[in-house]
Image (spheres, grey):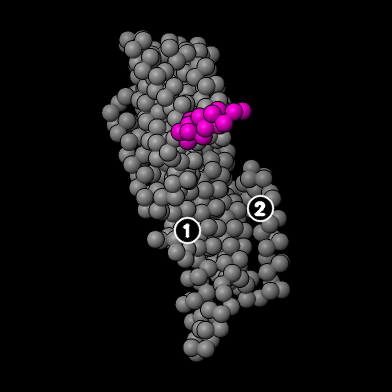
Amino acid sequence: MSIADTTIADSRPGWLALDKLGVLIALIAAVGAALPFALFRANRIVPGEAQSLLTALPQPPAIVLAAVLLLGIVTALLRFPVIAKLVGGFVVLSVLLVFIGWSGSHLTPEGDTFARVSPGAGFWLLIFAFALLVTDALTRLHFAPLVRIGILVAVAAAIALLLWSGSWNDLSMLKEYSTRAPAFWAEARTHLALAFGSVAIATVAGLPLGILCYKVKPLRSAVLNVLNIIQTIPSIALFGLLIAPLAWVAANVPGASEIGISGIGVAPAMVALFAYSLLPIVSNTVVGLQSVSPSAVDAAKGMGMTAAQRLIGIELPLAFPVILTGIRIVLVQNIGLATIAALIGGGGFGVFVFQGIGQTAMDLVLLGAVPTVALAFAAAVVLDALVEMTSRGGAR
């Protein structure tokens, strides 16, 4: 290469270089654009007719969507400023969410209540690609915890506005919801009670057990080994193993059935989720207490603090971010595992997932799966922010 060529290459703007992750995002988005954007079915169980991005929408909106996707791919591909990638990713996601509702209205025949229009593989792949772009940009921008929570609230408000506006009413998942709205909210309450209730009970039991394991070293390995064994049991197997003993308790212990204990239903689901929750909470409590600086403990001793005062006033506050990380792991895990509770009559969003599988109705599966994923994601974002805020220097 000549000196002139080198000078020209060095004078190129930095944004003309390729972004390594952006290349992957661009490839995923390109494949998504080539796959069906939507599926049309004459009714909820027949095979769908694939509709491309250009046929799923009227021509002018389809051209607009194609142009927006092209700009989004270019934004991901080149090394634009990170804030530009964040804004570009959100713009593309917003357009995709609005236009998929538009495709439902466009493809559904007037007055046809049996037809179903659902997002195709291309739509989900495009959502994944640009969600990855947004997530990468947020990670690189290092926003403060409260800002991240604010962004989450804004996204939730935007989706709520779309739902309220009725622009998604012609999509098959919303049609499934419209016929099951009371049952959906009842199962939502059950799902939240199972996930958050089991974590709350496990925290109340696991925190003292973790402190005991930290103080009594011979007990530590025995307790953690037992909890490790429980953690290795498959969730469906553990739910099943609890049916017989809880049925015996309900039949032989006075008052047990009156308070809701039975072989199937919420009781075995809650017990299983509680058992799965103990290991992360107990182990993180031990690790958090072990990570407390010995000099801080020595200083507290020098001030004349008792062992209980040191534990409550010094050790637990310093160990709290690590303990909260364990609670975060457990909550996200249990939001997903609560779906399996439907197999033993425990309720939750899993009811729609397994009904949909049994009826070969994928839109009914999505009615249970999408809220579960959204809830787990929101819980992870909020608790990640809380962990950072409670860490030393994390609240700045």
Tell me the residue at 36%/18% (across/down). 64
Give neighbour class at mark 2: few <14, some 14-19, many 20+ (Cα, 10 Å): some
Q: Quadrant of the N terminus?
A: top right
Q: Nearer the viewer, residue 274 or 126?
A: 126
Give coordinates of residue 135: x percent, y percent: 47, 40
Q: Amino acid at mark 2?
A: Gln
Name the residue type under label 1: Val
Q: How many marks?
A: 2
Which residue position holds label 1? Answer: 387
**Residue, x 55% and y 48% (percent of image)?**
333
Front in this rendered view, residue 222 or 359: 222
What's drawn in magenta, residue-wise?
A: 1-18
Q: Is residue 237 left or right of residue 13?
A: right
Residue 138 in the image: state x and y as whole percent. 44, 44
Q: Is residue 87 above or below residue 27?
A: below
User: If the image is split into quadrants, where does the C terminus sit?
Assistant: bottom left
For residue 214, above or below residue 77: below
